[in-house]
Amino acid sequence: MESQVNMAQESSAANTPAGPVIGVFCGASTGTSPAHLEAARSLAQAMHASNATLVYGAGTTGIMGEIAKTLVSLSGPQSVHGVIPRSLLCKERPEESGGEDEQIFGPKTITKNMHERKALMGQKVRDGGPGSGFVALSGGYGTLEELFEMITWNQLGIHGKGIVVYNVEGYYDGLISWVRSSVTSGFITPGNAGIMAEALSGEEVIKQLKEYKLSEDRLQLDWEEK
């Protein structure tokens, strides 16, 4: 059911399953290789097998739409929760069809802006059970921005959930190389290089999240409101 988010009143924890909740960042495009859509289906199948819930950007096109509709077909509409700003509806949900749409892609929450979108997605993952975390499938600027924000939040101690890049056909090889170079250049500590894990299959994504170890170099800061 479509809902309007109210950050002051909504209790994410009360509405989040106790099982794994996986926030997936990915493109609204399909990419030029069929391997990107296949990876989305592979991850959805692995999530179904582990009884995980998907939180994603609520798009119905590209990789976003593929992972959502695949998991809904396997686990039902309540296994997916989309979160999208109203301004993006025309771009990422171009063929909205009311209740029927939910039966294909799952329910969604509409937010006022991108900041509320990311905050709500992040909270739902943080409220999830063991094996919860964030995953980046293939995508563009938006995917990387969301991925790096979650990496930074982990480094700052805002959350302690796993972060995995699903590296399809070497798509993230350059990113992984950049992390190594940043360690060599002294901008990322060797311990914090492991904040972002790599997986080459849907099953490995789930395994990495279940076995994820926090970096000893991350900051131990108090982010609770006083």
Image (tube, rainbow, N blue to C red):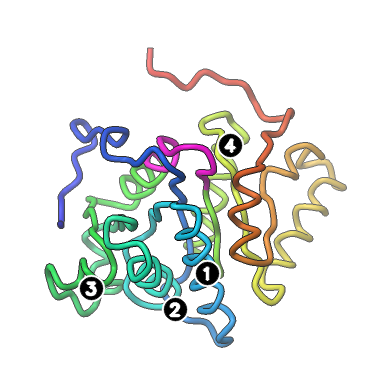
Query: Label 2, label 4: how many angstroms apart (C-alpha)?
Result: 28 Å
Lower sequence index among marks 1 and 3 = 3
**Which residue occupies 44% across, 78% down?**
29
Rendered location of residue 198, percent (x, y): 69, 57
Give the foreground label among 3 and 2.
Answer: 2
Residue 90 circle label: 3
Give the foreground label among 3 and 4.
Answer: 4
Dot 2 alpha-carbon crowd within 10 angstroms: few under 14, some 14 to 19, many 20 or more: some
Asked if residue 130 lies in the magenta stretch, the reply is yes
Query: Label 3, label 4: how many angstroms apart (C-alpha)?
Result: 32 Å
Residue 154 circle label: 4
Q: Which residue is mark 1?
A: 140
Could you say whether the residue bearing mark 2 is in a helix, strand or loop? loop
Lower sequence index among marks 2 and 4 = 2
Residue type beneath disc 1: Gly
The foreground one among 205 and 166 is: 205
Dot 3 alpha-carbon crowd within 10 angstroms: few under 14, some 14 to 19, many 20 or more: few
**Which residue occupies 24% across, 57% down?**
108
Question: Answer yes or no: do the residues labelled 3 and 2 have beta carbons within 8 Å?
Answer: no
Give the foreground label among 2 and 1.
Answer: 2
Residue type beneath disc 4: Asn
Q: Which residue is mark 2?
A: 29
